[in-house]
Amino acid sequence: MDTKKVDAIIERHKAEKGALISLLHAIQDEEGYLAADAMSYLSDKLHTPLGEISRVATYFDKAFKLEPKQEHTVRVCRGTTCHVKKSDEVYKEITDELSKDGKGFRFSLGQARCLGCCTSAGPVVEIDGEVYEQDAAKSTIIKLKGEMK
Amino acid sequence: MKIETIEDLNKLKAAGEKLLRPDILRIQVGASSSALSKEAAQVGGQLKKELEKRGIEAAVVSVGCLGLSTQEPIVEVIAPGKPKITYGRITAAVAPLLAGAIADGNVLKKHALYRTDVEELLCSTTGFSYGMASAEFTELPTAGEFKFLKPQVRIAMRNSGQINPESIEEYAARGGFAALYKALTKMTPEQVVDTVIKSELRGKGGGGFPAGQKWQSCREAGGNDKYVICNCSEGDPGIGMHKSLIESDPFSIIEGLAIGGYAIGAREGYIYLHHGYAAGRHKLKKAIDRAAEFGLLGENIFGSGFSFTGTLKEGAGAYVCGESTALMACLEGRAGEPRPKYIHTAEKGLWDKPTNLNNVETWCNIAPIIFRGPEWFTKIGTKASRGTKVISLTGNISTPCLAEVPMGTTLKTVITKLGGGMPKGTTLKAIGIGGPPAGALPASLADTPIDFDALWKAGSMLGSGGMIVMDTANCMVDMTRFFLKFLEEESCGRCFPCREGIKRMRELVEGISIGVGKPEHLALLEELAECLSQTALCDLGKSAPNAVRCALRHFKEEFDTHIEREVCPAKRCAM
Amino acid sequence: MVKLTIDEKNIQAEKGSTILQAAKANGIAIPTLCHHEGLSPLANCRLCVVEVTQNKRTRVVTSCNYQVQEGMQVATQTGRIVSLRKTIIKLIMGRSPNVKIVRDLAAAMGIEKTPFTLENEKCILCGLCEHVCSEYIGAHAITFTGHGTGKFVSAPFCVSSADCIGCGACVEVCPARCITKKDVDDAKTYYWAESETVGPARVMYNWNARVAWKKCPKCGNAFPPPSVLPYLDKGEALPKEFFDICEKCR
């Protein structure tokens, strides 16, 4: 953890009331996750008990990651519309694809509550922050695996 | 340039009119932020190049979302003195054809959807006219005749897809800030509250509580520190709805919020949305900064003595944070858990101060209501539900779309007239409206009007207005399990009935879906439903049982088949 | 004073008091699990629900945090209320069937078994430990991790709780009796890692904390943190330097 970076983040938000959630997001955007030492440092600088920071960081378990990211993040949308379009089958297909060889574990596979692309033709999948329709998603995953050494 | 007088505002308006109706060609490219938006951005640039090749200069502008996603990218051509022509499906391949048609002064008939000669503006006494139709345009339907727009009354979506959402000038050209001017310089705060009460506007976030009543309670609460909040976080999964308002017309949110602040006596407004929603963040931040630049946010707006600041605040995206006390906890930087509401947030809300929270769609209705007066609003909709509702139509439907219809429009009308009906070879089975706790209504109830009371009587609820159409390939036991699983995962876990109860309801329905359900499980489900609806701490727990009750009321046979014959007729459940 | 009725009995209660307090003061028992009189009401367990009728409107509310109002009529044992409480008990029994207070409550309501598949959680998630530690003691050494059914109480980020002062208030308020403390001669032998604590200490197992006994400035003896219960039960604040001077010398 670079204390200068965290100091800069705290400085940027100093005028904001109740800034903890914004601060955690800013730290995660910078480092990719919320590291333990960053959380202790934040607790000291803000004079906020570590218990409160832990409460907020772990309550929003989909937003905040306490461990470093993997190389690729895949999230299959599980909103009602995508479910109606059988996104659970897409999830299964991607799980199978990632279990085929040894590279799958370098992907972090999860489900998103709703990616907001509900008027798309079929269920959607987010890969490394970009949204794809299911066929494009599957071929992208195969391509990414191929590029991995 | 600070806008301080009506003359200043009129100058801004005129500048916007010059942008909307320039002396050269104006091309508007619109798309929602779906997977298609990248293509839309490219089409605009391509058209500009193609037109330049033919010696034609054009201003190409990105506008927001009209709501007709199956026709995207939508391109609108505004030629000086001619009606605006709206085209659909202008892909990269079609762009050269369109450029050619424009150069020849023709309409590309294959892709033309409708024309607009003159448009009535809700926040202006004068309409906006493009040009009268001459012979070659009269074949095209007008906007009012176009089948997608005909059933609609666009109040919250009045500017969606019509303006560059980042341009304060274009917003002003269509009447933007005229309502704020009227409120601050010609009305007292009490008169503004009274107008909202008389309009009978009910909140669009799910609760349907009369907005004016909330405003009045907050106004009457003592103290100088009060807050108004706009909830922009899309709670219900599967609708992608409020994104459109946020990205297509952010200034209307700001104007509504400022009017609300004036009425209630709040100097600070918060706009709350998920951190992960980058596009929304950028558009709103730009709009807030721009409004402040022009003095329409900040100190002494319009010289009225009223000062108001809008601040964007980000949440971490949990469904339960749509509940007002949980949302306020997030704004305070705490975990988003609801608190008991025996003392209302209108008296003790954000930081224990009187607070008024409304949904983004509710705020987008405020400016027209103030400008036109409450009687105009009460003439639209039904007695119990005045005005309109933005409906997101998705699922197994031919034309998924976003539209705004008068309350009272039936579900069937939305499906057939706006949605183009069921895709060929499929049959309507159920219509979900209102999110997971609302369950779904059967096809036999498609004549139910979109109205708070009518939907409640039918066993569902209006909620956010996201309509999800389900065909016979769906199983209602599976959907109920899906809704319960969603609510189980979103429960904050604070109170016992909701934390333990939703899980147990989900286990029971899951058991039914995999063929191990027993007849007595239905009685146990009802016992849990009664317990949660009466004793849960917040509306997530209180309304969760409705997903089960609605399903058992309308689809009991399907549950019985799963239990007694251990068969899933739709072949969706893993038996 | 406010005039109201509880179970058709005329009651007078202090303005600003809750229905639960008014009932208790008049010998009317209402079951609770997450309530402690010295702390502000949590309203988590929902067992204390009652029916309240005001202005011809009847609602089900939690009595621990609903303030008494002039003319209100409260009913604590209607058929509906008893039925709701039974369902809540059955739900908790499903989660924590082997916790004594849960079994006692079930027995008192005549419930023999729960229809739900049994888990075996020792903690009922009432929230009292976190509540006393933050609201009364001010140490914030205990927190909730996660949300929903997966939620649990822990030290911050589930590591050793550096803010714990070893007062044991959490042990004393826990209705499930699942928090353990032990006073030991030498903390170093009681844990896996880096305990700098030497000499007598109090080990708080649930929060991974070893807190050294303080030395009394007056008599020079090391002493364990005293119990806060005598003050907490009466809703009184702790006297100054409560943890710094031993009981004998105070």
Image: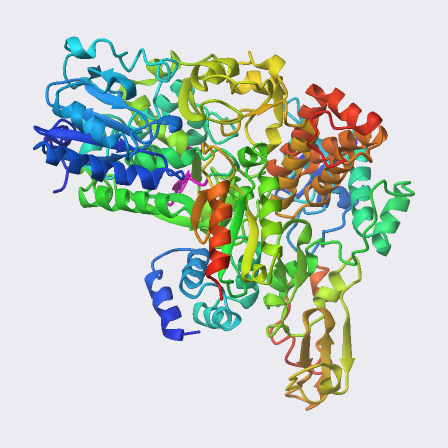
Out of B109 and B349, give the one closest to the viewer. B109
- Which quadrant would the C terminus of chain B be assigned to in this image? top right
Q: Is residue B78 visible?
A: no
Instruction: Give the quadrant of residue C91.
Output: top right
In the displayed structure image, the side of residue B249 where residue B477 appears, left or right: right
Q: Which residues fall within the magenta stretch? A: B217-233
- Which quadrant would the N terminus of chain B be assigned to in this image? top left
Out of B428 and B128, give the one closest to the viewer. B428
Residue C101 placed where, x, y %? 84, 53
Q: Is residue B146 above or below residue C39?
A: above
Instruction: Give the quadrant of residue C82.
Output: top right
Residue shown at 21% from the left, 39% from the top: B45
Residue B21 placed where, x, y %? 13, 26
Residue A109 placed where, x, y %? 56, 53
Q: Please tell me whether residue B421 belongs to the stretch shown in magenta.
A: no
Instruction: Give the quadrant of residue C37.
Output: bottom right
